[in-house]
Image (cartoon, rainbow, N blue to C red):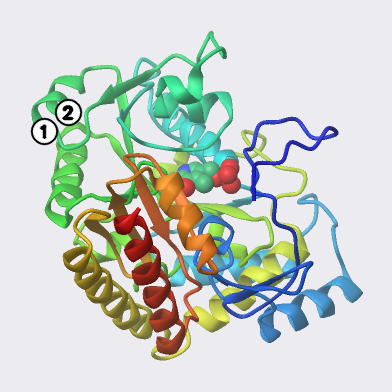
Amino acid sequence: MQNAPIASLMPVYKRVDLTFSHGEGSWLVDTAGRRWLDFASGIAVTGLGHGHPHLVRTLQDQAARLWHVSNLWRIEPLERLADRLVAHSFADTVFVGNSGTEMIEGCIKLARRFHWAAGRPERYRIVTFEGAFHGRTMGAISAAGSAKLTEGCAPLLEGFDHVPFGDHEALHRAIGPETAAILIEPIQGEGGIRVVPPQCLEGLRALCDAHDLLLIFDEVQCGLGRTGKLFAHEWSNARPDVMALAKGLGGGFPIGAILATARAASGMTAGSHGSTFGGNPLACAVANAVLDVMLADGFLADVARKGELLRARLSALAEAHPAVIAEVRGKGLLAGIRTLPSNADVAAALREEGLLTVAAADNVLRLLPPLTITEEEIGLATAAIDAACRRLAAA
Ligand SMILES: *Cc1c(COP(=O)(O)O)cnc(C)c1O
């Protein structure tokens, strides 16, 4: 399974030479008929697994009725989705788009327009954190700021102040008369499953209140049930003013959302923002179906319980294989192991055992099973990791 460049595709991805024909729950089946246990979930997207009957039926029904009309008219599935996101969050108001990076762009505009509308146009800068990932548009790469993302793309969008992860003094120093907002992932995903402790999120809330800044949470990866709460920040007492969602929201259908308080969204007046595809009936119908499942009694508690089980098993494996697993990270089913061999080598060894994972920064491998994973499947995954660790340790 070497990387396979495809002549007709821009080589921006290093692809593994594996093609899947279909999926069933926690499993993917490749074109040769081999079954793979999917602990990648399309990078925390297919949170309800593959081929979930309620999602499939919803998409088919909606496809037969109405695909697209535009926000020039009212859209029933969009209004229902917005009402439900408001009912189950800190937010008063929602904008729906198509992807995580597009939502981050919207958050940047929202933060700038909030201060502009309040007569403080000089406040446009946003504090962000090293190791962050916010997407691939110019605004999102400028926000994250790492050379890996921004190389060759200059000039970047101006107005971001990057502070080291966990450096409270640098954070305080970065706030000045031009600061508009703080943007943070409650759990860094691409950055290596780095959890921001609840008291730090609460500290950020207090800091934003003291300086009249907007607190923006990027929950594109950690949100939507992944940690065992609907939103990751709900493990703390901190509530943001604004939040970006995407990945898990559509269960595999592209959709993103910005949630905000009415006050934070006060600059988002008619004509100030938009999206041709945003809020389309297909995406919103599927997102509503995702919420039907996630909001059902006991679903999120079960995710939290399975997350504890997975992490306990991973901790035992780290003790058994100290030459391979250095550290276990995460919350709920957003789990990561920092490996001592290169994470790419460990991922390849896991593939030989039939387990699919995703690499992250900091030499971390992410374990992102569908939230519908069974205990038995968690057992299969940890047995596969055990077997791979044995082989790696013996090599
Ligand atoms: C994936 C991701 C994004 C970007 O989402 P896209 O849908 O790929 O544009 C933004 N923020 C975080 C935290 C992400 O994990």
Q: Where is residue 59 in the image (x, y as percent from the top left)?
A: 77, 74
Q: What element carries label 2?
A: helix
Q: Give the image location of residue 257, x and y in percent.
A: 55, 53
Q: Which residue is drawn at 69% across and 62% down?
A: 253
The residue drawn where x is 56% and y is 39% is 101
Q: Which mark is residue 305?
A: none
Left or right: where does residue 73 sit relative to residue 265?
right
Farthest residue to the right: give it. 64
Q: How crowded is mark 1: few (under 14 residues within 10 Å), some or many (20 or more)?
A: some
Relative to 158, is 130 on the left or the right?
A: left
Amino acid on which disc 1 is placed: His
x and y, in percent, of residue 19 in the image? 74, 58
Name the residue beneath numbered marker 2.
171
Q: Can residue 82 be seen in this view?
A: yes
Counting every numbered tag in the picture gives 2
Judged from the image, the secondary structure of the residue bearing numbered disc 1 is helix
Identify the residue at image location x=28%, y=80%: 309
Q: How far apart are marks 1 and 2 (CA)?
A: 5 Å
